[in-house]
Amino acid sequence: MAPPPLNYVAVPESFKLPAGMNFGGTSGIAINPQGHLFVLHRGPKPLMEFDPDGNFVRGWGDGLFDRPHGLRIDSVGNIWATDVASHVAYKFNPSGRLEMVLGVRGRAGAMHDFGHLRLFNEPSEAVVGPAGDIYVLQGHGKGPCCIIKFDKDGNFLKVWGQNGKGPGEFDIPHSLVFDAKGLLYLADRSNARIQVFDADGNYIREWSQPGTPCGLFMTPGQQIWLAHGHTGQIMTLDLNGKVLGMIEGSGQGKTLGRYGEAHYIAVSARDEVFVADTLNWRVQKYVRK
């Protein structure tokens, strides 16, 4: 039985770029506490900020990225971005000043013991948890897959996981969100599932998510929005993995509401849904019908 349709419709992209500028492959989308939209893309000025109506505010990051990937904004507006080719995670303060670099740019770790090597291998995403700890998902390519936990100051705390298909093992850990109780929900992309852990990495449960679950977003009402990778489907789930609804018309393609790769997702306080599409070089926007 097909999931019920969500009451959203795709609208033309509303980002107003400066004259002569275009997005490259749009890998990340995030929204700060003031409602401003941030886009991470593979082109000049790889980090761009827009106001809630899509007006360009600023762009920066030239020279810092080789292949931008994940983008998150924490509760106080710090901007966290990863680069899978440079093997680093960056923290920018709300004004855009670089404040922390995790990893060593241009050096890939051969093992996943970050506590010893201080090296990443293709970090997908860096996320700040409810207690202020930092979680970096590693293993976007052929490197070791794991989750690495740091304290708020960037000091290494622990690492868990390895390549595999069992509980607590990963094949491209891609996106991470937290529920109101502090549990972690992880999109284990190439294992086609969502795994759930506590804040210390203890395995709780999982569910199958056929396809390539890529981007997750947790709403204040404790529903999960999922951007479903190359299937291009955009859906909502409850915390047990039940599909609550799906946006009609979402899927593979080049036209409005369709995707080359539905990569990461964010939902605004206006209840607008934004999905970064790496292959179609755009951010798809949905509004309520």
Image (cartoon, helix red, strand yellow):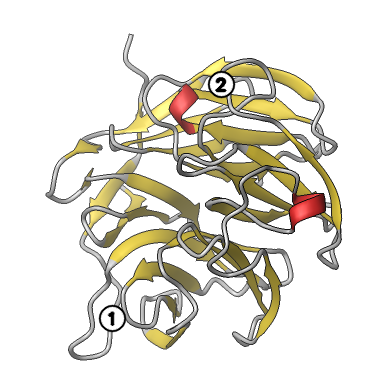
| Callout 1 amino acid | Lys
Q: On screen, 8 above or below 72?
A: above
> Of 52 and 240, which appears nearest the observer?
240
Instruction: Give how far across and how far down residue 169 sits, in percent.
Output: 64, 24
**Residue beneath label 2, please?**
241
For the point 85% across and 36% down, which residue is it?
A: 200
Instruction: Give how far across and how far down residue 198 sits, in percent.
Output: 81, 32
| Callout 2 amino acid | Gly
For the point 47% across and 71% down, which residue is it?
A: 38
Mark 2 neighbour class, 10 Å CA radius: few under 14, some 14 to 19, many 20 or more: some
**Residue beneath label 1, please?**
16
Instruction: Give how far across and how far down residue 70 sits, in percent.
Output: 51, 57
Question: Which label is found at residue 170?
Answer: none
For the point 45% across and 43% down, which residue is it?
A: 141
Would residue 123 appear left or right of 61 to someone viewing this image?
right
Q: Spatial distance from mark 2 to mark 1, Cα to Cα?
A: 36 Å
For the point 37% across and 68% down, which residue is it?
A: 41
Instruction: Give how far across and how far down residue 44 sits, in percent.
Output: 33, 81
Would residue 174 appear left or right of 43 to someone viewing this image?
right
Q: Are marks 2 and 1 in contact (CB under 8 Å)?
A: no
The secondary structure type at the circle numbered 1 is loop
> Of 262 and 170, which appears nearest the observer?
170
Q: Residue furthest top?
A: 1
Counting the numbered discs, the total is 2
The secondary structure type at the circle numbered 2 is loop
